[in-house]
Image (cartoon, rainbow, N blue to C red):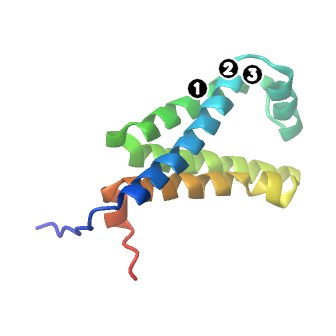
C-alpha cells in the first residue's frame, strides 16, 4: 500500500508566482539553447574560454532545449527539472574548474536551479507533496 501525502490548494497568487518564476527560467533557457544552435562569436568564444570544443555548441543547444521542453510540459515537468538540475550542475562545475567569478558566473546555475524548482514547487502539487514545507 502506498501512502499519499495531500497538500492543500495553492493560492492564486502562489500559482502565478510559480508560473512567473518558471517563465523567467524558460525564457533564459530558450534563449541560451537557441544561441547555441547558430554559430555566433559570443558562443564560440565562450566555449573556447571554458575549454570545450566549439563543435559541442549545437548538441548543447539541443540538450538545453529538450530539457526545457520537458520542464514546460506539466506531465514531464519534474523530469525536466531533474535534468535541468544536472545540466546546471555541469555548468557550475565548469565555471569552478576555470576559476570564474563567484556570484556572477559560478553561482548563476544555482540561482537558475533554485528559481526552476521554486517555480515548480509553487505551481505543482506533486512537488509540494514530495517536499512538504511545514509552518
User: Is residue 12 or residue 88 the one in the foreground?
Assistant: 12
- Mark 2 secondary-structure assignment: helix
* Viewport quadrant of the C terminus: bottom left
37 w.r.t. 84: above or below:
above
Residue matched to label 1: 62
**Mark before the other along the chain sequence, 1 or 3:** 3
Q: Residue at x 40, y 49 (%)?
A: 78
At which x and y percent is residue 87? 60, 45
Q: Position of residue 20 (x, y in %)?
A: 52, 47
Query: Residue 10: percent from the left, percent from the top?
Result: 33, 61
**Marks 2 and 1: CB-CB under 8 Å?**
yes
Q: Residue at x 39, y 68 (%)?
A: 131
Which residue is more in the foreground, 90 or 8? Answer: 8
Dot 2 or dot 1, earlier in sequence: 2
Q: Position of residue 57 (x, y in %)?
A: 71, 25
- Marks 1 and 3, Cα distance to the nearest angstrom? 13 Å
Query: Position of 128 compared to 93: left or right?
Result: left
The disc at residue 3 is: none
Amino acid at each position: 500500500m502506498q501512502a499519499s501525502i495531500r497538500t492543500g490548494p495553492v493560492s492564486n497568487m502562489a500559482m502565478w508566482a510559480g508560473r512567473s518564476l518558471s517563465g523567467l527560467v524558460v525564457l533564459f533557457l530558450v534563449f541560451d539553447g537557441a544561441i547555441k544552435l547558430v554559430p555566433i562569436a559570443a558562443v564560440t568564444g565562450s566555449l573556447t574560454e571554458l575549454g570545450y570544443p566549439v563543435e559541442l555548441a549545437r548538441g548543447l543547444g539541443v540538450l538545453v532545449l529538450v530539457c526545457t521542453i520537458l520542464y514546460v510540459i506539466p506531465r514531464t515537468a519534474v523530469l525536466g527539472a531533474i535534468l535541468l538540475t544536472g545540466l546546471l550542475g555541469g555548468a557550475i562545475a565548469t565555471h569552478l574548474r576555470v576559476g570564474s567569478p563567484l556570484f556572477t558566473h559560478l553561482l548563476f546555475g544555482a540561482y537558475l536551479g533554485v528559481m526552476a524548482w521554486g517555480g515548480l514547487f509553487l505551481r505543482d502539487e506533486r512537488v509540494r507533496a514530495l517536499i512538504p514545507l511545514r509552518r
